[in-house]
Structure formats: structure tokens, C-alpha cells
Amino acid sequence: MWSGSPARVSRPAALLLLAGALVVVALLSLRVGSIPVTTADALAALTDYDPDSYTQTVVRTMRLPRTVIGLGVGAALAVAGSAMQAATRNPLAEPSLLGVNAGASFAIVAAVYLGHMTHPLQYIWFAFAGALGASVLVYGIASAGGGASPVKLALAGVIISALLGSWTTALLLLNKETLEVVRFWLAGSLAGRSLNLLPPVVPFLAAGLLGALLLGRQLNTLSLGEDAARSLGMHTGRMRAAVAGLVVLLAGSAVALAGPVGFVGLAVPHIVRAWVGSDYRWILPFSLLLGPALLLGADILGRVLARPSELQVGVVTALVGAPFLISMARRRRVAER
Amino acid sequence: MRVRTLLAALLAVVVLTGCTAAPGNTSGPAPGNSSPAGNSSAGSGSSDPAAGDNPVGNAESEPWTFTDDRGVTVTLPKRPARVVAQSTAAASLWALGFEVVGVFGPQRLPDGSNDPTIGDVDLSRVTSVGEEWGELDLEKLAALKPDLIVSIMYVPPELWYILPDVQPQVEVIAPTVGITVGQRPIKEAVQRFEDLAAALGADLNAPEVADARRHFDEASAALQAALAEKPDLTVMFGAGSLETLWVSNPPYYADLAYLQELGMNIVVPDNPEMYWEALSWEQALRYQADVLFYDSRTGVVQPPELAAQVPTWNHIPAVKAGQVYPWVAVPPYSWDGLATILEDITAAVKAADPDVVR
Amino acid sequence: MSVRPTATGARPDEPQAMSRRLRLVQVGPVAFRIDLRMAARVAFATAALLALGAWGLTLGSFRLPLADVVRALLGSAPADAAFIVMGLRLPRVLAAMLVGPALAMSGAIFQGLLRNPLVSPDVIGINAGASVAAVWWIISHRPPVLLPVVAFAGALGAAAAVYLLTWRGHISGARLILVGIGAHALLTAGTTALIVRANVYEAATAYRWMTGSLAGSDWGDVATLAAALALLVPAGLVLMWPLRALQYGDQTARSLGLPLERTRLALMAVGCALSAVAVSVAGPVGFVAFMVPHLARMLAGPVGGGLFLFTGALGGLLLLGADLLGQHALPVSLPVGVITAALGAPYFLFLLYRTNAQM
């Protein structure tokens, strides 16, 4: 673990800077994309929307929703990842380890296969239910026989994910039409999402974020390890269950909105820890801001790089984030003990 | 010690089976024919490459040969009677009067009726050896004792619905024939099926076949005339999802290539990846045409939903003008089926305003 | 933030290992300690594997009585039966019996080497390297004959890249896992980008390959696998002792006179090669490399040569059983990769459910 922060800038100031950066990225996300839009048009689309203007239509009905959704998804994934890594004390931990992505993917593939659904608004609840079901299963199995130890939790998560993944594949191989509909969803994308996806998800998302932010101190204790946490009087089993519940809310919301976007939940906590040290009271708010900044940045890149087509944000986060993670693993003494 | 015995046993198994496999492979070509096994990709070295174009050896005693679109010449001791074919090929041969014994590829819709791909093949009279992509049952195929296996090719030399990993074994069961249907006008493809059907002994002069052919020629002439009346009409073919708009690349589609031949001005995307160019919906106005033919298959998101979910869809000129028509993106390779499609297109062309995009 | 070194795979000698009945066997100048109980387990698992394989030869939609199968094996069956047995069933059964052990042993090596029970070649980039190369090859319609070679090259290329990126004077297990995960994510994203660009048939072919399938296994595949295993299994066995020493920690291993980095490199090389050859033939069949070593340890105790062989035999059993199930037990045939997880996972979950929280 990195001791102390390389504090040239104080943490509150850094947090403010990061917030400013996030605002800039969000505005860029409205301004930059597959077709050129003038700043005037981009602003007019927000303040004085003219549906007959093509560029304003693009900004208002396509870029605005994906930006707003990207903010929520990025925050949810990054905060969930931080909480997971603290609670399991494993640098490999990320939300999908609870089976969230696999559960949502399977539920959606099943819904498309059996119910011939084609639209996100139809299958958003399936995604949520799948995420919830899978994670309850993972947690239930891992905590049977006396508490969910990190290793058992992770093992159960990997296994349930593999199991659901195999069922998903079976459905996809049995039915090309399903494959045709969901292979884009499975890549993880913000494109084609409209704002009416948000209302059903926002309560869960907000509850998850708020809950996680309030648990900073407890996560600090938990990240000291089982014995240390117990000796400090913490009921570790209950605390892990609470964290798992929050992670499910967050990751379930994210996957329901954008599909299985990997890597944000894994990489952001590592980046933040390298930046601000190991205090979760700081790691969580930094993650909350860095997650969406990274996700929106990746989304913008995906729109620009593959013009006139688009690269799915799930693909870009990995393509951009992975080299970063690798170089960080090389530079720092990450988890070397 | 255990290791050694295990390895010895393993090696013994390999050596043993290697020896027995050799005779197994050469005598393998399924019962009933003694063709040169499984080397068709090397070409069976016929001295008469043009033979396939004409039904040679109708007499039962003479050897039968056919040269397919890969340039592979199949030579058999007599005319094949038991043919297993991929759905599209089976439908085409069936319509030309040749009945296959087995099929693989799409067969039934969820409601139990024939999938459009398999046309009028009577499924109660043929054996299925696999329906889904990659589900070819080699043992069932071998049990059918086919003389010949026919499939189509979009990207030669890849046989449709025979995945590369099983192709060597399929070639051992019976020689294969591939008819190219992509990247060539559809009329040529159907003519190649006529060649094959004739070689297999079908009577192309039978009244039904001749009528269908006449039907197709008339429909082609009618469309050509309608297009000639509107020289400025531009047309785009495509499909979409909630995230992507695909603009079709005409040369790769047999039907579009033929429509171009008849004089249709079809939009050609600038940077297609073979079959299409994928566009972000922000780019919906990148290519413009008076008329949009839109992929009508059930798995594809259809215009009413696009209108509701994708705001830029409604800005497309052809959509604004109400000139969006269904496109049968996987056409049948039969004269009658094609004639019907051409008639529908003709009606759309006649009704269309050619000045939506100037 | 810590990788827990004491989790499942990493517990060297348990007290009860001492009480096992060990026998010293001397062959020329070399002496072995043979754990009789482990030997019995290996023998039992191997026998079960062979029996399952024999049964598998009688299954299929082409009905063949047992007598015909035997005659086909002896070379005296009619042509059609001979083709079904010798041309289709036997190579597939043998391929399963060889791919399973290769994957399982590879997993055992990696889990031991990296001292992390969540590791397998699936997650540190090796399979992802094979997949991205193979999917690119498939959807760009290049000659299918070379697909295994391309997949093999992709797997080894990814492994080499991960190794070199991890190297900083020495190889750290935790760093290798992180680099491996990064490489996995990168390569998987590449695969996804390719699949999203492809048409649905190309995507379906790619998915099928990535699921792992034994359809189309032929004698060439069997020969490749057998030759590779003949080389790699003894190498793996020889490396089991150093692997065990490594698990006591670097200090201990060094004090035993072990050249640490060379040993790790050798273990990596053998583990990668085992995985790569299996993947090149059958595609990245998931779960076997991850799960079987756990199963073997749960059933049979600590790391060692006997356990290594037992792991291999279990891997063969799982893969062959899964392939037979996928082919014959269901109304539609499914590739083996779908079944390995569906079949193995519940049993593993059951074991996990029963273990107490101490692991």
C-alpha cells in the first residue's frame, strides 16, 4: 500500500480540480462527436432547442442523454470498484466479480431470446434482476458455513459468472437473431440510450452512491484485514454484506444502463489510490469524479476515432485503461507483499 | 515410473490408432461411392474443365463431372442421386425440379412453417442434418450416404453452413459443390444452379420451370422500363439498430448487383467493410437517396421503432418523404421468388418521387 | 490490497501429509517417494477416463452396436462403421482426453506459481491472445488450415508480452497478475471490436471458436496434442518439486539453492505451452484450467507430482464427460466449452458451500 499522499496539492483542492475537469469533459461530450457541431449550436440545443435543426437534434437527443447516463454509470462503477477492493482486500476485485455483469447479461440474452425484446427500456429490468439474482447467489454460497471470506466470495463470483456465461453463450449459439441483437449490448455502450432509461434506475443509483460515500471510515477498517477489523470491534461479516449490497445497487444500475462496461471499476480505484493514498474517505469521492471523467473521455474517443462509425465505450475503456494499468503495475509496487 | 507407463500407453495408443486410421481414411468415403476422397480443394484434375457447364454423362454408365465455382471438378462414377444441400441451395434446386434427400441450414420458423430461405422444399420428405449455424451433424450426414453435398458461397472458397473445422471430414463423406451467390448478379447465381440441376438430371424445359423463368424475365423488363423513366432516382439499401446504421455495399449483394445491372442508381458507401459501411446515427445524413429500401427481416429493428427511438432517423430525406420500402435482404435463388421481389420493387419505383434529393 | 498467499493452492505441507504412507522407489540412481494413496487416485481417475472414452465411442446418432465399434477399432468393420468410429468418434474422444489434462495442468502450474487461487491461463491474457488472433483470422476469411497455428502464436505472443512487461529484474507474482489482467482486458476489447464489426455469421463462427469446441477434431490434432503432452507433462512433473519449494516463499526457495527466476520462467513456459496447445486445437475452453486444480486439491491434498497427474486425469474426465454430454444428452448439440462450466460449476459450488470459512 502506498503510505501517505504525494501531496503537492491538498486533497480538497485536488478534488475541486477533478470536479472542474469532469465538467469540462462533460461539456466536451456535448460538443465533440461523430459530426462537427458548433459551440453555438451545442449551447442552443440546451437552452433554446430547435427540433428542426439537425445538429441541435444530435446534441439534444443523442449526446445529452449519453453524457448524463455516462456520468451515472462511470460514478457507479468506480465507487463500486473501490468498495469491492476494500472489502475483499484483493486488487483483482471489481464489481463484475460479484456476478453482476454475468447475471445481467444472461437475463438480457434470455429476455431477448424468449421474449423477442429489442429495446433497452424493455430489458432494463431484466438486467437489474439478473444482476441482483446472480449476486445474491454468489453471496449466499460464499457466506454459507460461516461468513463470506474474500477468497470464497471471489471464487463463488468467478464460478457463477462462468456458469451464467456458459448459459449465455449457449443461447447465443442456438439463435443467431439473439446474437444479432445483443452482441452490441454485450460490448457495453452509451449510444442509443435515451433519458427515459434513467428514472427507473436513479433511486438505486443514488442510494448506492450515498451509502458507499458514508462508509469510508468503515471501509478503512475493513481494508486493514479480518483480524485487525475485528479487534477494532467491527462485525466484519455484516459490514461485508452491507458493502456487497451497495455494490449490487451500483453495478446493477450501471449494467442496466450501459451493458457490461469493464475496467472502470477495476482501474479507477488503483489510479486513485496511487494518487491520494489509502484513506477510503478520500478514495470514494475521488473515484466518484474520476470514474465518469474516464468513461466520458473514453466515449468521446470512441466517437472520434472510429468516425463515421463508433467504437463502443466498453471497448475503449479497456483499450485505454489496460495500458495504463499495465504501466502502473510496472511503476508502482502494487500489491507487492 | 507411473509417468513412463502413462506416456508409453499414450504413445502406444497414438501409434496404434495412427496405423489403423490410415486404411480407415481411404476406405472412408461413405459407402456407395468411391470418389477420390477429400482432396477436392486441390482440384481433382479433370481434363475437361468446361464439362460442368453442360450435363455430360447423362447415360448412367458414363462418369459424371461438374466444375463448381471454386474451380473444383467433382468426378463421380455415375450421376449422383442422393444429394444433401444447404437450405438456400436446396430451395433453388427444388424449384428447378431436383429433389434433395437431406438439408442443413435454416428450415422452420417458430410457427412451424418453412423458413423463407428453404423455399418450397417439402421438409417432411427430406432429412435434416443440422439447423443452426455450426450444428452440422456429421454422423447423420454420413448415415444419409450422400453422393454429393451442395452449399452456397458468399466468400469463396468458404462453404456456407459448413464451418472450416469440420470441412475436411465432410469432404470425406462426399464430394462438395459450392455455388457462389455473393459478389455476382443474382441472375448469374440462379443460372449456375440451373447448370447444376441440369447436370443432376432435372428437366429445365418442364413447363413450371419455363414459366417461372418467363415470369422473372418479364419482371426484370418491367423494372428496367420503370427505372428508365426515372433516370434521376437514387436508392439506398440499409438496415439499422438503435446504435448503428448500416449502408449496404451493392457489389457484395447478388440482388443489388442485379438491380444495378437493370439500371438502378444505388448509393455506394465510401469505406465499406465488405458488405456495408457502419455509421453512427449522428451520421444519418452522410449518404442521401430518394428511396430507402430497409432490411425487413424480423431480427432487425424496424422503421416504426426507429422513428420513435432514433431522432435522426426522422431527418433522413427518404423517411421524411415517406419513401421507405421493405427489402428482402436474403433473397431466394429461384426465378419465381425473385420475380415477385422485382415486381414489388417496380411498384415502389413507379410510386417514388425522384426529386427528394437533388 | 494483498494477495493472500495462504489460499487454497498455496498451502505446502499439511500435517496429515506426514502421516501418509510413502514408499521410496529407486530406479537406477534416482529415488522417488511415492504416495500410495495418490498413486491409487491417479490410477482410478485414469481408469475412469479410459472407460468413459470407450463408452463415448459407442454414442452417436449413427447407431452402431458395440461389436461394430470393436471391429472398427480392429480394422475389420464395414466402411461406414469404420469411418464413423475411426474418422469421427475416436479422434474426438482422444482430443478431449488430451485437451482436458493440458488445460488442467496448465491451471495447476499457474495457480501454484502465482500463489493466487483466482488465477488461470484464462484471466492473464493467454486465452485472450489466442482469441484475438483467431477471431481476426476467422472474420478476415483467411485460410482456416492455419487457424490453430495463428491461435497458438497469439497465445504465446500474449504470454511473452505479459512476461516481458512484468519483468523488472525479477518476476513478481502480484505484478504478473495485474499485467496479465491488463493484457486480458486489452486483448478482449480487441476481440469485441472485431466481433461488433463483423456480420452475424462471422460473429457466430467467432463465438463458437471462443466457446471452445471439439467438433472437427481429427488425427492431426490428436497427434499434435500427444506430442506436446509427451514433452510437457514430464517437464511439468520435474518442475513440481521446485514449485513446491517456491510456495514456501522466495527466501526459503533461495536457501534451498533454487535459481528463482529461471525456475519461474520454466514454470511459466510449460504452463503457457500446455494452455496454448490446448487452445490451438479446441479453442479457449473455459473453466477447466481454473476449476480442476481446485477440485483436485480439495479431493487429494497438497501440491506434488502425484497431484499434478491427478489434476490432469480429472481434467480429461471433465472435458470428455462434458463433450459427450454436449453431443448426446441434449436435444441440440452444444460445444464443450458451454458444458464444462454448466457441468463443473455446480459441483464446485457444492464443494465451496461445504468448506468452512477458513479457506
Image: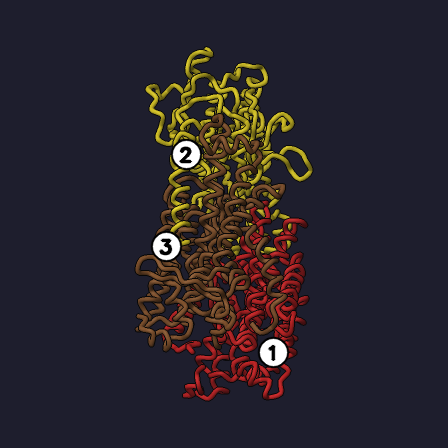
Chain colours: A red, B yellow, C brown
Which amino acid type is shown beneath numbered disc 2? Answer: Ala
The x, y position of residue A282, in whole percent, is: 52, 83
Q: Which residue is mark 1?
A: A212
Which numbered dot is residue B206?
none
Q: Is residue C96 above or below residue C169?
A: above
Secondary structure at numbered mark 1: helix
Q: Is residue A132 above or below residue B34?
A: below
Nearer the observer: mark 2 or 1; the answer is 2
Q: Is residue C116 above or below residue B157?
A: below
Q: Which residue is mark 2?
A: B21
Q: Are marks 2 and 3 on the same chain?
A: no
Nearer the observer: mark 1 or 3; the answer is 3
Q: Are marks 2 and 1 on the same chain?
A: no
Give the quadrant of the C terminus of chain C.
bottom right
Which amino acid type is shown beneath numbered disc 3? Answer: Leu
Task: Please give the count of numbered marks on the rendered protein.
Answer: 3
Task: Say which of A275 and B125 sits in front.
Answer: B125
Q: Quadrant of residue B291?
A: top right
The x, y position of residue C279, in whole percent, is: 43, 51
Give the Cα separation between the discs numbered 1 and 3.
49 Å
- Label 2, residues with CA under 10 Å away: few <14, some 14-19, many ≥20: many
Q: Which residue is mark 3?
A: C232
Give the Cα separation between the discs numbered 2 and 1.
64 Å
Q: Residue at the spot x=50%, y=16% of the render?
A: B201
Q: Which chain's residue wears label 1?
A: A
The x, y position of residue B203, in whole percent, is: 53, 15
Give the Cα separation between the discs numbered 2 and 3.
25 Å
- Do the residues bearing badges 2 and 1 touch, measured as CB atoms within 8 Å? no
**Residue A206 visible in the displayed image:** no
